[in-house]
Amino acid sequence: MLSNHFQNGIETAKLVWSRLPNAEDGDADEVGVSKKIDGSSVESLDYEVVENHAYREEQAQRGKLHVGYYVVVKWFFALLIGIGTGLAAIFINISVENFAGWKYSLTFSIIQKSYIAGFVVYMLINLVLVYSSTYIITQFAPAAAGSGIPEIKGYLNGVDTHGILLFRTLIGKIFGSIGSVGGGLALGKEGPLVHTGACIASLLGQGGSTKYHLSSRWLQFFNSDRDRRDLVTCGCAAGVAAAFRAPVGGVLFALEEVTSWWRSQLMWRVFFTSAIVAVVVRTAMGWCKSGKCGHFGSGGFIIWDVSGGQEDYSFEELLPMAVIGVIGGLLGALFNQLTIYITYWRRNYLHKKGNRVKIIEVCLISLVTSIISFGLPLFRSCSPCPESDPDSGIECPRPPGTYGNYVNFYCGKDKEYNDLATIFFNTQDDAIRNLFSAKTIHEYSAQSLLTFLVMFYTLAVVTFGTAVPAGQFVPGIMIGSTYGRLVGMFVVSFYKKLNIEEGTYALLGAASFLGGSMRMTVSLCVIMVEITNNLTLLPLIMLVLLISKAVGDAFNEGLYEEQARLRGIPLLESRPKNEMRKMKAKEAFGNQKVVYFPRVVKVADVVSILKSNNHNGFPVIDSKSGETLVIGLMLRSHLLVLLQSKVDFQHSPLPSDSRGGSLPIRHNFSEFVKPASSKGLSIHDIHLGPDDLEMYIDLAPFVNRSPYIVPEDMSLTKVYNLFRQLGLRHIFVVPRASRVIGMITRKDLLIEVFNWIIPLYVILSAL
Ligand code: ATP
Ligand code: MG
C-alpha cells in the first residue's frame, strides 16, 4: 500500500528525506541519512467517502429538501466562522495593543525620571506577559505552540496531527499570542490567527466541544472529515483576512498555501467567509475609533497605509528592485535553513528535558530581547528633528510619555529623536508603519538600520520554535522592510534627480523577504497590496516576489514545508518526484504481506489482528464456490465501533444474507464518525467476554464497497496523483484485471437530472 511514500526504503523517499533526519526519531543520527517515519505516530484522515451499506441507505433516504437544507447549513457555517474569527482577531488585537500601549506609556513616563527604573519596569512587564504565554502553552495547550500553519497545511493535505483542533488549543492560541506578542518577542500574531480560524471552524463543524460540555446537538451536522476539511479551509482564509484585513488575500492564501484540494463551490464559500470577516473587523474598528477600546483604534490593526508615497517608478529603478528580490531570496532561504537547525536541536535535545526548560528558555529570550531593544538605542546618538511641515502630520519629537514615530529616547536636546528607538523600542505595528513611511526621508541612518537588521534577524531566528504561539509574517515584514529601506537610501542618493521614496523600497523589501522565506507569490502580492492600500506598486511587488521565490527555491523549500517535515508531517506535495515515473505501484510496498479479513470473521480473530498491527485499512475477501472476491475496504475505526456495540455479532459462521434474507442494517452512518478533536477508540479500550470472542461478525454491510484499485504495474507517478488529487488514504494494488465488463467515457457522466433541486442549488450557491 502507498499510504505514505516515506516507507519501505523507496528511493524517492530517501531523496525527500535526505537532508535532515525526522525530528520524531529520537535517536536520529547524522545529517544526510534518510529516516523512516514511525507510521504509528502520524495517521491520515478519511477524506474518501466510505460507501458502505449504511451510507448508501442514508443517501437513498435523503430527500430533496435534505440536500437543500445541507447547502443552507454549509453557508450558515461559513457565516459563523467569519463572525467567530473576526471577533477572535479583534479580541487579540485589542488586548495586544492595550498591553503593549500601557507598557510603552508607562516606560516612557518613567524614563523621564530614571532610565534604569524604566528599563526594569519594561523588562518585568515583558517577562510577565511572555511567562504567562509560555505557561499556558506548556501546561495547558502544547499544540498551540508555533504558528500552527504547517499542521493545518498537513490537516488539509490529509494528515491528522493530534490536538491541533482542540478547544483548549484554541484558547491557548488566543491567550498565548496575546502574551507573546504583547511581551515584545520577535514574532507576530498573524500565523496564530490562521490556526485560530481553523480551530473555530473545526469546533463549529463538530458542534462545539463535548469534553468541556460546550456543544450543541443542533450544530452537529457535519460529521465527516471531508466536510470538516471545507470548514477548516474557510477558517484559514478567515484567519488571514482578519489578521491583515485582506479578504481577497485570505482567499488566495487558502488556495495557494494551505489547501491541497480546491473546487469552485468551496471558493465561493471561502470568499463569503472572508467578506464577513472584513465586515466584522471594520465594524469593530469603527466602534473603537472613538477611544472606547483604549490604545486600540488609533492605529493598532495591521494596515499600513502607504498612499501618498511614490506615484510611479522609472526604468533605472528596476535593477535595485531586482537586487532587493535577490537579497530577499538569500536572506529568506538562510532564515529557513537556520530555523531548521535550531528547531531540530531544540526538539531533540533541549525540549526533551521537560517543560521547565522550555519556560526558562522563553523567559531568557524575553530578557535578552528587552535588553537589546532597550539597550541598543541608548548607544545611538540622536538626530535633530526634521523641519516641521504642518501638513505632513509629523510630530517631532513626540510629546513626553507617548510612543510612535520620532521617539525622543536618551537624547540630550529636546528637538531631537532617536532613530533606532523609533523602530526597536516600539510596538510592531508602529515600527512597521515608521519603516514604510513615505513622508519621512532620511529618517533612519544606515548604521541604525543595519544594527536593527542584524539584531532582529538573530532574535527572530532564536525565538522561532520556542514554546509560545508565534507567527513569522510580522518579523518577516520588519526584517524585509529594514534592508529594503537601506537599499532605498542608496538609490535615493544615487539617482538624485528621480522622485524616489525610501518607504517604497521598504515595502518591496518586506515582500521580498516573505517571498524568499514562505515562497508564496499570488497571495502575498495581494496581501501586500491590501495592507498598504497602494495599487501602483503591484507590478513591482510581483517582480520582487518572483525573483525572491526563485532565488529561495534554489536553496531549500518554503518555511512551512520545511517545518512540516521537521514535525514528521508526511505532506504529499503537489508534484511527485521525477524518479517515480520509472517506478511501479508494486514497488511501493515491497514484499509486505497484505493483512486482510475474510467476509465472515471470528471476533477473536478480529481482536488479535487489530492488536498485532497498527494498520487502519484492511481488504475484505469473500470466497464463494472456490472463487476469491475482494468485496471492499474495512477501516479499523469502523471495526472498533462494531466490536464495541456487539449488536452485529452472530453465532453462525455463515454470511447473514446466505439464508435468503437481505443484509441487516443496525447502524446509522453517523455512528461510524469520530469527532475531529478526538483520537477515537482504541482496541485496548474495548472489553469483550469469552462468549463474545467465540462469536462471528459478517463484515459485508460495513465495508467500503468501492475502494480505489490500481493494477500492479501502474507507474508510481499516477498512483501519487490519484492519491493526492482524490485525498485517498488507502489504495489496493491488484494483478492485471481478468475481464472488462464495460467502458465509461465523459459522455456517460453527463447525466441530465430534471428536478427542482438543481435550480435551488444554483440559487443558494449564488447567494
Ligand atoms: P495512515 O497511517 O496513512 O493513516 P494506515 O495506518 O492504514 O494509514 P499504516 O499501517 O500506517 O497505514 O501503513 C504503514 C505501512 O503498512 C505501509 O507501508 C503500508 O503499505 C502497510 N500497510 C497498511 N495497511 C496494510 C495492510 N492491511 N496489510 C499490509 N500492509 C499494510
Ligand atoms: Mg498509520
Image (tube, rainbow, N blue to C red):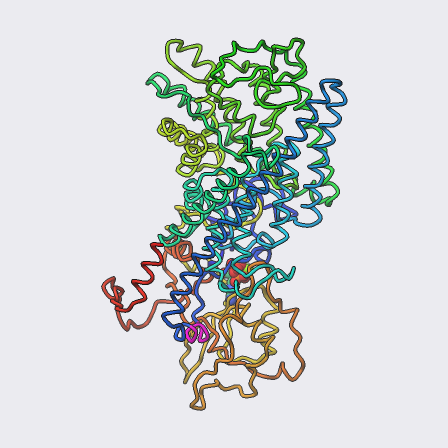
Based on the picture, tell me whether residue 148 belongs to the magenta stretch.
no
- The picture quadrant where one finds residue 415 is top right
**Residue 117 coordinates in the image, percent (x, y):** 76, 23
Q: Please give left or right for residue 141 compared with residue 714 in the image.
A: right
Q: Which residues are magenta?
A: 52-58
Q: Residue at horizontal 52%, vertical 38%?
A: 285
Q: Is residue 615 visible?
A: yes
Q: How many marks?
A: 0
**Residue 434 coordinates in the image, percent (x, y):** 53, 23
**Residue 582 coordinates in the image, percent (x, y):** 37, 51
In the image shown, does 635 or 107 lie closer to the viewer? 107
Q: Is residue 705 above or below residue 581?
A: below
**Residue 298 coordinates in the image, percent (x, y):** 55, 30
Q: Residue at horizontal 64%, vertical 62%?
A: 213
Quarter of the image that includes the C terminus: bottom left
Q: Is residue 674 above or below residue 480?
A: below
In the image shown, does 304 or 650 lie closer to the viewer? 304
- The picture quadrant where one finds residue 752 is bottom left
